[in-house]
Structure formats: structure tokens, C-alpha cells
Image (cartoon, rainbow, N blue to C red):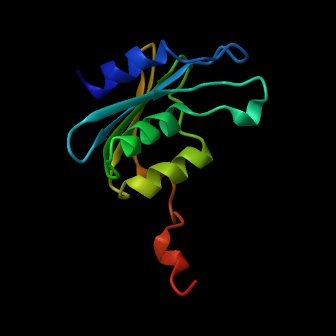
Amino acid sequence: MSLKDAAIAVRENAHAPYSNFKVGAAIRAASGTVYVGCNVENVAYPEGTCAEAGAIAAMVAAGETQLAEVYVIADSPDPVPPCGGCRQKLAEFGSGDVPVTMGTTAGAERHATIADLLPGAFGAGHMAGA
């Protein structure tokens, strides 16, 4: 299954009763294994989780820590980029050249890299001497 197909499929499982804005994410780890996540809303809005965060959590739970590719999809007029927090999470587990594809359910796509989405990302190197 392609990353796009995996993201489309998992998007259907999103728990979005408040916004009705379902998001699906699929990531390929360095091993080639695909992990998926969907947004999970909570009535206490800050307590929900993003699709990208869910996919990353699944990858880490499986014992992997290196991203190779990302696909995110939503029913939106334009491809929706990851939120700021998810951009930082992607940068934690993927190098700047990791491709990120943002898609819509209508078929539009936008291609970027993690570095495009988060230039100057904060990383472990910034904590040297801490």
C-alpha cells in the first residue's frame, strides 16, 4: 500500500466530532515500514492529538526512530501543512531532506521537505553544554 493510500484509509478512523475535520497521516520509517495516525479530538481541545503525532508515536512504539517519508491528507480546499508542533516532531525524527507530501481528498498535492516546513529547526545540537 502506498503512503497516500495508507493516509486516506486511516483518515476515515479520525475522531473529529467537534471540528469534523479529519486528518490522516502515513509515515515510512527508515526500515520501509509504514505507520499511520489520525487526529483524535477531545472535548477539552488542547488534549487532542494530531495525525502526524499519532503516526510518529506508532513508529516509536514499534522501536523505530528514523523517518524517511511523510504523507498527510485532509478534506480541505488546499493541502494542509502540519501544525507547528508536528513540524517540530517531524524534525525530531527526520532529517531536513525527508519529503513531506500534503494532499487533499480531491487529489491536490503540495510537496516539501521537513526543512522547508521548519527552517532553522531546534535540535539536540542546540542543547550542547546544557
33 above or below 22?
below
Give percent across and percent down for residue 26.
Answer: 37, 31
Q: Is residue 89 positioned above or below 122 on the image?
A: above
Q: Residue furthest bottom?
A: 129
Q: Is residue 65 above or below residue 41?
A: below
Q: Which quarter of the figure is the N terminus placed in?
A: top left
The spot of residue 58 in percent (x, y) is: 41, 36
How many labels were placed on the picture? 0
Name the residue: 33% across, 41% down: 62
Q: Quadrant of the C terminus?
A: bottom right
Residue at (54%, 16%) from the top-left corner? Answer: 75
Using residue 70 as the reference point, say whether residue 85 is left or right of it: right
Left/right placement of residue 2 relative to residue 110 reads left
- Residue 81 is situated, as x and y percent measured from the top left of the image, at 53, 37
Establish if 95 lies above or below 73.
below
The answer, for residue 91, to whether it is visible in the render is: yes
95 or 105, nearer to the observer: 95
| Rendered location of residue 76, percent (x, y) | 56, 19
Name the foreground residue: 56 vs 88.
Answer: 56
Residue 115 visible at all: no
Which residue does the image show at 77% across and 23% down from the upper left? 43
Residue 61 in the figure: left or right of residue 81 = left
